[in-house]
Image: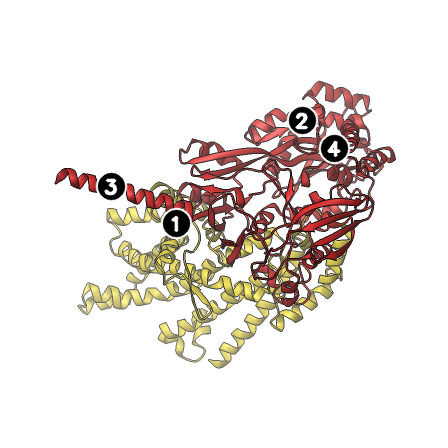
Amino acid sequence: MRGTGLTGARLGAALLAATITAGAAEAATLRVGVQADAGTMDPQAQNIQTTLTLHAMVFDALVTRDRQLKLAPGLATRWELVNPTTWRFHLRPGVRFHGGEAFGADDVKFSIERAKAASSQFQIFVAKIKEVVVVDDLTVDLVTDGPDPLVPDKLTYIFVMDRGWAEQHSVREPQNLRTRQETHTALNANGTGPFILRTREPDSRTVLERNGSYWTPIEGNVTRVEWRPIANDPTRISALLSRELDLVIDVPTQDVARLQRDQNLRVERADEFRTIFFGFDLKNEQLKYGQPGGGNPFRDRRVREAVSRAIDIASIQRATMRGLATPTGQLLAPGNVGYDPALDARLPYDQAAARRLLQEAGVPQGFAFTLDCPNDRYVNDEQVCQAVTAMLNQVGFNVSLNLMPRARYFPKLWERDTSMFMMGFNSPYFDGMYALETLHMTRADPEGIFNYSLYSNPEIDAMIRAARDETDLARRETLMKAAWKRVTEERIYIPLYHQVLVWAMRTNVVAPLRPDNWLEIRWVKVN
Amino acid sequence: MIAYVLSRLWQAALVMLVVIGLAFVLFTYLGDPVVGILGADSSEAARAAIRSELGLDRPMPVQFLDYLGRVLSGDFGVSYRLGRPVDVILAERVPATVELALAGMALALLLGIPLGILTALRRRSAGAQALLGVSLLGISVPSFFMGVLLIWLFSVTFDLLPSFGRGETVDLWGWSTGLLTLSGWRSLILPAITIAVFQIAMMMRLVRAEMLEVLRKDFIRFARARGLSDRAVHLRHALRNTLVPVVTIAGLQLGSVIGFAVITESVFQWPGLGLLFLQSVAAADVPVMSAYLVLIAAVFVTINLVVDLLYLWIDPRLRADGGLEAARR
C-alpha cells in the first residue's frame, strides 16, 4: 500500500509537472517591466525606444531584421533599386490587419506619407522620400530626392497602418492637438504584427495576445505579453525579484551587481548604440557663457584636445557608470557601418599634456565657462557631468555646471544657447551616415540638424556629401571611414563612452538582446 | 448661514483663480512641451508648426487669457503626452487616488484615535511611552523609504503581497474600483500603510494632546464629581470635546493625502493622480499639470468648507448666529 501510494504520488507529480511544462510551451505569458510607458499606440507619434519596442509587437514594417541584424523581408518580400532615385518594394500578398482589413500598397503609401506629417516624430526617416507611387496593389515605388541607399534601413522604423481604419477613426495625422478630442490611436492600434492589442491602460498595464494568423511562423512561444511600466527603479527591480515580472529592459546601473548574484535571474548586457559625448560652441567669437573678453578658445582644436585628455574616462567608467560604459574615441558604436577600430581608442588621460596643450593654445591659465547638462535624459548624466567638471577644473578650467531637466535642456540646445554641452546620440539603422550628416555638416536642415556646435567646414561637408550620395556600398564605406577619421581627428566633439545596455530576466526566459535596445518579441522563449 | 456658505464659495472661487494663474506662470518655467511632443531630435520647421498649432507662439498674457477662458468653460485641453482630453484622463485616475487616500485615512483614524485615547489615559505606562516613541519614528520616516522597505519585506523577502499596481479592477458606472477583487485588496495594503504611517502617528499624538488638555478642564472634574463612571467621562465628555480639532485636521489631512500621494503612488506605480502628475512634469505636459493643480486646489477648498460645516454640527455653541466667527476669535 505504502509503496503504491508513493508511486501514485510520484506519478501524479510527474503528470502534473508534464502538464505544467506542456502548458508553458503552449501558453506562455511574458511580463515585461519598463521604466516609462509608451505615450501612445500611434506608430508615428513617438520615436522613443520603449515605444518602438511595444509598437513592434503590434505593427510590422516593410523591412525587418534577422538575428544577425541584417535586413530581412517584412511586409515587403523583396525590394530593388530601379534607378538611382527610385526604390521598388514588392509587398507580401495575403496579409491582413488585426481588424480583418487586407494589407496593400495603399496602406504603405498612407503610412509613409503619414510619417512625413508635422506632428510625426519619424520625419527624419522619410525626409528623403519625395513621392510614393502605387504601381499596383502589391508594388510601390519610392522616389527619393537624390540617391539614398539607406531607404530599406530607414523603413524598418516605419510601421504600416491600415488606411481605411485610420480614416474611419480620423487619425490621418499622428498627433492632433487642435481638435481637443481623444486621438483614437492613443489607446487603439490596428496593425499586422505578431501580437494583438487587447487592453491598454496607460502607465499601468498593456496586454497583448498572439496573432493566430500571423503571416509567418513565430519562433518564440510567447502567447501573451503583459507590459508593465514601473517608474520607480527599486520597485521595478523588486517586482522582478518577487517574480511579478519576467523581464526588465531598463535595469538601473546600481542594481546590476545585486541582480547578478540572484540565482533565479540572468543579466545580459550589450554595448548600446548610444554614444555620450560633449560638444562646444564652435562658431561665436566670444563664448556666450564664458569669460567676458576671453574670446572663444574652444575654436582652437588644441583646447578641445586638452578637454579630452583631462577626462579620466577609466574612473568615470568604473565609479560613475559602475562598469556599464565602454569608453570610445569615435562617436559611433561597433556594429555600425563606418565604425573604425583604429579611431575607437580615446586620447590617453594625461593632465600634463592637457596643460601643455592649453599653453600652446595661448590659454595657459585655462578659462571659465558653463557646462550645460541634462539630469533626466541619459544614464547617470548628472553624475558624469559632475565628475567631468571636477576633472576639467584640475587642469585649470573654471567650469560652472548647469544641470536641468530635458524639457528645458533641449530647447536650449535647439537655440544653440550653450558654450559646452552633453549629448547622447543614437545611430539608427546600424549606419554611421546619420551621425555624420546631422552632427557634423554645416547647418542647413536636414544637414547639420543636430549640429548644436554650429561647426562649419566646407571640406568636411564635401567629404560627407560624397559618401552619402555614393550608391556603391563598398566605396561608400571607404568614403565614410575617411570622413569619420577626419571629424574624429578634428575633435569636433569629445566622445566619452557608449552606454551599456542591461536586461535582467528570469532564468527561464530567453530574450535576445539587440544593441539598439529593441525587444524582438518574435524571438522570445519562456521555458 | 446661507450667507456664510456663499461668502465661503466666493473665497473659494478667488483661491481657484489665483491657483490657475500661479500654475500657468510656474509651468512656463518648467520647460518646453515641444520636447515631449516631438522628441529631442526634431527639425526646426516641425517645431514651428507645432508651436503655432498649439498657440505657443503667442504672447504669454494672450495664452493665459485663452487658457483661463477655456478652463472656465470646463475645457482643460488635450494632454501633450497622452494625446487624450485632460478631463477624461483625470477622471480615470481619480478613483485610484481616492481609494488609496480613503484607505490610508481610515487606517489613520481607526488606529490613531484609539491609540491616542489610550496613551492619554495611561500616559505613564511603559506601553504608552513606547507607542509615542514609535510614532515619532512614523512621523520622521520619509514615505519613499517606508514604501521601499515594505516592498522589500512583504514582496521580495516574504513573497506575500504585490509590489506594484492596483491589481484587478472592476468598473462600477465609470468608477474603477479595486475594492471588489482579492488582488485589488492585496495591492492596496502596502500603499495604504505607507500613506497612513505618518497620519496614524500624527492622529495619535493629536488626540493624545487634545485629550490631556480636555481632561484638565473643569467640566471633566464636575463630571467626575457627579459620580459618572470613568468610561462615561472619557468617552462621552472628554472624547467628544477632543474631536473638534481632530475632525479639522483629519479633513485637511485627507486633502493633503490626496494632494501629496505623489511619492507613495510613484513608489508603488499606483495609477492615480500623483503618478500622473509626476510623469506630466517630466514631459512638461502643461495641460495635465494645470488641471491637476486646479483639481487639488478644488479638493482643499471643498474640504475646508465641509470641515467648517462639520464644526457647526459637532459644536452646538457655534450654531448660534455668527457663532462661528465668534468662536474663531
Q: Which chain is yellow?
A: B
- Please give the name of the residue rendered at 46% of the width and 35% of the height, measured from the top-left corner: A266
Q: Colour of chain A?
A: red
Q: Nearer the viewer, residue B247 or B280?
A: B280
Disc 4 vs disc 3: Cβ atoms closer than 8 Å?
no
Residue identified by numbered label 2: A311
| Same chain, labels 1 and 2 | no
Q: Nearer the viewer, residue A245 or B194?
A: A245
Tell which tag, 1 or 2, sits nearer the viewer.
1
Looking at the rendered structure, the secondary structure element under dot 4 is loop
| Mark closer to the chain start, 4 or 3 | 3
* Tag 3 subunit: A
- Percent position (x, y) of residue B328? 45, 69
- Percent position (x, y) of residue A174? 67, 58
Looking at the rendered structure, the secondary structure element under dot 1 is loop
Q: Nearer the viewer, residue B220 or A95?
A: A95
| Same chain, labels 4 and 1 | no
| Same chain, labels 2 and 4 | yes
Disc 2 vs disc 4: Cβ atoms closer than 8 Å?
no
Residue identified by numbered label 1: B162
| Same chain, labels 4 and 3 | yes
- Please give the name of the residue rendered at 83% of the width and 45% of the height, measured from the top-left corner: A146
Distance Cα–Cα, label 3 vs label 1: 34 Å
Q: Amino acid at mark 1?
A: Pro
Q: Amino acid at mark 3?
A: Leu
Distance Cα–Cα, label 1 vs label 2: 44 Å
